[in-house]
Image (cartoon, rainbow, N blue to C red):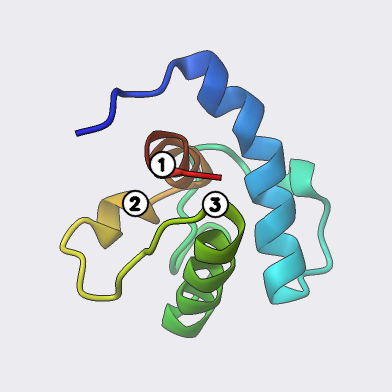
């Protein structure tokens, strides 16, 4: 199992992941408008399941690992920008 990323690593990655989300979904907001701990799905950013699939696809391409739709941890992984960035930091190969 990969080592847990440091908070500094996650904080440094969050703007990049926020920009990736905005690009993937063609959102008309600034990356800084995505709050680190606000929910991505439903309330908060207001994403739906199709949006989450789009994000999973671009994350897989950008960072070199698969986010599977049948992963029981998806609720945790996509809980917030910070949670997604933490997961990416711990799993990425690129």
Disc 3 is placed on an element classified as helix
In the picture, which quadrant includes the C terminus? top right
Q: Which residue is mark 1?
A: 83
N-terminal of the two: label 3 or label 1?
3
Disc 1 is placed on an element classified as helix
Q: How far apart are the two marked residues, 3 and 2, measured between alpha carbons?
A: 15 Å
Q: Which residue is mark 3?
A: 63
Residue 76 x %, y %:
28, 50
* Crowdedness near tag 2: few (<14), some (14–19) or many (≥20) residues, C-alpha within 10 Å: some
Q: Residue at x 61, y 57 (%)?
A: 62
Residue 13 x %, y %:
62, 33
Q: How far apart are the two marked residues, 3 and 1, measured between alpha carbons?
A: 15 Å
Identify whether 19 is placed above or below 72. Answer: above
Q: Residue at x 63, y 47 (%)?
A: 17
Q: Residue at x 73, y 62 (%)?
A: 22
In the picture, which quadrant includes the N terminus? top left
Q: Residue at x 29, y 23 (%)?
A: 3
Check contact, mark 1 vs mark 2: CB within 8 A: yes
Tag nearer the camera, 3 or 2: 3
Identify whether 4 is placed above or below 53. Answer: above
Q: Which residue is mark 2?
A: 77
Quarter-wise, where is residue 24 in the image? bottom right
Q: Decide which of 37, 13 is in the foreground and name it.
A: 13
Identify whether 60 is placed above or below 83. Answer: below
């Amino acid at each position: 199992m990969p080592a847990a990323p440091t908070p500094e690593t996650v904080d440094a990655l969050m703007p990049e992941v926020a920009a990736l989300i905005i690009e993937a979904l063609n959102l008309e907001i600034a990356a800084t408008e995505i709050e680190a701990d606000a929910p991505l799905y439903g309330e908060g950013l207001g994403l739906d399941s199709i949006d989450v699939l789009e994000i999973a696809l671009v994350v897989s391409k950008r960072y070199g690992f698969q986010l599977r739709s049948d992963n029981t941890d998806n609720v945790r992984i996509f809980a917030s920008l910070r949670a997604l960035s933490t997961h990416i930091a711990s799993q990425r190969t690129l």
